[in-house]
Amino acid sequence: MKIMLDAGHGFDTPGKRSPNGMKEYEYNRAVANYAKQMLEDYENVTVYFAHSDEDDVPLQERTDRANALNVDCYISIHCNAFGNGDWNEVDGIETYVYITKPKEAYELATVIHKQLLAVTGRDDRGVKTANFHVLRETKMTAVLVECGFMTNRLEADLLKSDEYRKACAEGIVRGLADYYHLKKKPKLVPRILSTTSEKNRGLYRVQVGAFKYKENAEQLAQRLKEAGFDSYIYYED
């Protein structure tokens, strides 16, 4: 299963910011990063990014890459805005598919939308259709989520919070997992590699995983480090 996550816009996209200065891309990229981390817990899932922190990747380049990679679905992550850029009371979450309402896209959008509402508790603005480039020019199932309004004071504060960003990522991933019946990777069960007697002042070593490819071992070592555990990699013939 190949999934492309698209953090909408870029750091320097004109106008895409809240009245108090938060850039939309700051939120979008954070949610994409959290979603990618969460999807790494599922079997047979490869995640690609359409965006880049270096520049605002043109829309055509994003969809061309998705089509060239032949990904199975494309999820575009955004914040919403209303009016002329000033604070107002419009709020809530809405999710979009292309104007022709492709069956699979609409079904996936409905599941993701439901999960986003469940984890955030925000108002339901529904699943809608739009002629957005990323929905029109992608050859695969494509969904665009608007996870709150930058022009609403309450939601702008939420969009800036790490807790809300993680919740939105969780909603997106839950929706993908539910719709595509993704399976979690087996939990790693530590096993004792070797022991020595206490009187010899030896060490008990715990192995968490064994991999054929070094890249997979390095990824696990990084996850252990982030969880607060020291780790090292050694190679056996």
Image: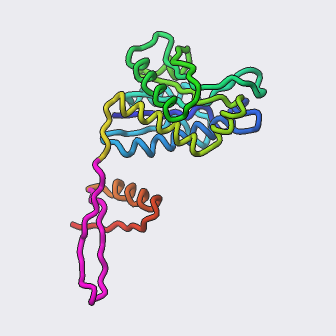
Task: Specify the farthest residue to the left.
Answer: 237
The quarter of the picture where the C terminus appears is bottom left
User: Which one is in front, 174 or 21?
Assistant: 174
> How would you classify the magenta stretch by its main secondary structure?
loop
| 189 relative position to 34: left or right | left
Q: Is residue 127 above or below residue 222?
A: above
The colour mode here is rainbow
Task: Specify the farthest residue to the bottom.
Answer: 199
Residue at 37%, 34% in the rendered image: 177
The quarter of the picture where the N terminus appears is top left
What is the magenta range? Answer: 186-211
| 47 relative position to 203: left or right | right
Residue at 76%, 37% in the rendered image: 20
**Residue 45 picture quarter:** top left
Question: Is residue 25 located in the magenta-colored stretch of the structure?
Answer: no
For the image shown, how many numbered marks are present on the structure?
A: 0
Q: Is residue 66 above or below residue 104?
A: below
**Residue 214 picture quarter:** bottom left
Q: Is residue 6 above or below residue 198?
A: above
Task: Specify the farthest residue to the top.
Answer: 100
| 107 relative position to 207: left or right | right
Residue at 37%, 45% in the rendered image: 41
* Residue 38 coordinates in the image, percent (x, y): 43, 44
Question: Is residue 210 located in the magenta-colored stretch of the structure?
Answer: yes
* Residue 95 coordinates in the image, percent (x, y): 53, 22
* Residue 166 coordinates in the image, percent (x, y): 53, 42
User: Which one is in front, 76 or 150?
Assistant: 150
* Residue 18 coordinates in the image, percent (x, y): 72, 33
